[in-house]
Amino acid sequence: PTTGVTLKIALDSQGGVADLSSEKSERFTCSESLDMVHRLRRVSDAVLVGRSTVEIDDCTLTVRRVPLVSQGQQESHGETEERNQPVRVILDAHLNIQLDHFQIAKDGFETIIVHVLTDYADTIDGKMVKGSCVKTRSETFPNVTFLSVPPINEQGRLRVSARRLCEILRNDFDIDHIMVEGGPNTAAQFLKEGIVDRAILVHAPILFKDPLLSNISPAILKQAGLELI
């Protein structure tokens, strides 16, 4: 079995995911769309974003706009059925995030920061760890786990392999379904590696002054093995 992956991304009429002319990131989709996002989070084991999304939005990635347990689940399993918030997974290849600046490190819900295993860090008993992952708990934020993974080299840049990460999250964290929420580079990596099972694109009828383009074209979606429904 492989980890299931849902990609969700919202776009303006030009294919932009954000307005670079705006000093503050603002929601630009309707309330029905936001409710859908929270329902998707509710049925996911993890919600995954890149570091820039956290830095721009200071997002929590939790389920808030809908009950954490759906009415159907309550009826099937009884009122005592409990569900945890999805694990938040943040891709930060070179571990640059300043955690103390963001809500996601302080709310107590489980968070995994993924970065690459390099020749300059990540040793155990003084020896480099090759071909595996290393898990360490944050001393400052008990809900945060740092996950070091072997990198892939793309044109001289060390990156996290989306495919390998999904395998690690499944085998080491029992995460069977991931919802990828952004940003455009993260979405592109998952599409490029052909591991997105469904992509939900929300098109908002607005026009950004200076759009940050997603570069997600019909051709890229087709190359990723996806078919328009």
Image (cartoon, rainbow, N blue to C red):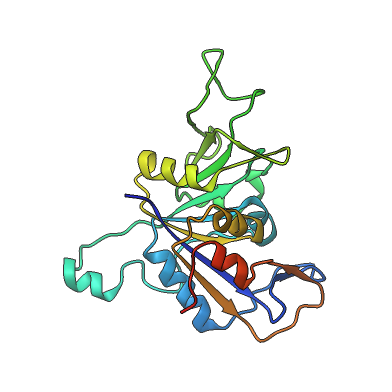
Please tell me whether residue 15 is drawn above or below residue 195 in the rendered image: below
Quarter of the image where one finds residue 38: bottom left
Please tell me whether residue 174 is drawn above or below residue 10 in the rendered image: above
Q: Residue at x 53, y 37 (%)?
A: 146
Quarter of the image where one finds residue 54: bottom right
How many numbered badges does the structure rendering display?
0
* Closer to the camera in the image, 45 or 13: 13
Residue 15, x across and y down, in percent? 69, 74
| Residue 37 placement, left or right of 28 | left
Please tell me whether residue 189 is drawn above or below residue 161 in the rendered image: below
In the displayed orientation, state which residue is furthest to the top: 126
Please tell me whether residue 11 is drawn above or below residue 77 in the rendered image: below
Q: Residue at x 52, y 21 (%)?
A: 129
In the displayed orientation, state which residue is furthest to the bottom: 205
Residue 98, x across and y down, in percent? 67, 43
Residue 34, x across and y down, in percent? 52, 76
* Closer to the camera in the image, 131 or 30: 131
| Residue 205 placement, left or right of 226 | right
| Residue 66 placement, left or right of 88 | left
Q: Residue at x 50, y 52 (%)?
A: 107
Residue 173, x across and y down, in percent? 38, 42
